[in-house]
Image: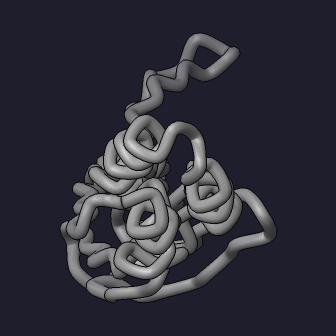
Amino acid sequence: MVLAGLVVAGCASMANGPSSEVNIATQPVGARCTLSGADGFSAEIATPETLSVPHKAAPVTVTCMAPGYRRTVHTLTSSGSGWLWANSAFIVFTGGGAVLGMMVDEAVGASTSYRRDFNMDLEADAGRRIRATQRNGGPTFDLKTP
């Protein structure tokens, strides 16, 4: 039984892998997004797009822009997968013999994963109104910034 426990130790690396496929979508469609994260991860996409994001890159900053909309920034975070708990159980079951498998899974980031769909709503850029008064006491103007 100990041998079986050692064989399946590190199974997160085999089943979950070092990255997750993430669907990134925005409202409006067609926004230009830049992703940057730990371990040197970066990508530039136009939405909607599905891309492979390494688990070790977490947290990933997603910055999106579209004409007529404000620049929007959100964070894509990873969370522990069920394999983390499976590894913990294998460690207890094998009396600590599966620690090596858990270390391998942690090293490649296989014990975490990202959610499958990541959606962002960009806020329309309405501009701002500015009230300007002439110094000589002339009329007041309302101006709209772009």
Give percent across and percent down for residue 117: 21, 67
In the displayed structure image, the side of residue 135 where residue 50 appears, left or right? left
Is residue 26 among what the camera can see? yes
Place of residue 87 in the rendered image (x, y in percent of width and height, measured from the top left): 43, 50
Residue occupying image coordinates x 61% and y 81%: 43
Q: Nearer the viewer, residue 59 or 135?
A: 59
Residue 65 in sight in this render: no
Q: Answer above or below: position of 17 versus 63.
A: below
Height in image: 16 above or below 47? Answer: above
Residue 45, given in percent of the width and then of the height, sits at 48, 86
User: Does 87 sit above or below residue 118?
Assistant: above
Locate residue 134, reporting x and y percent.
Answer: 61, 22
Q: Tell me: 84 left or right of 138.
A: left
Asked if 75 appears above or below 129 in the picture, the reply is below
Q: Nearer the viewer, residue 11 or 124?
A: 11
Name the residue located 22 percent from the left edge and 80 percent from the top edge: 29
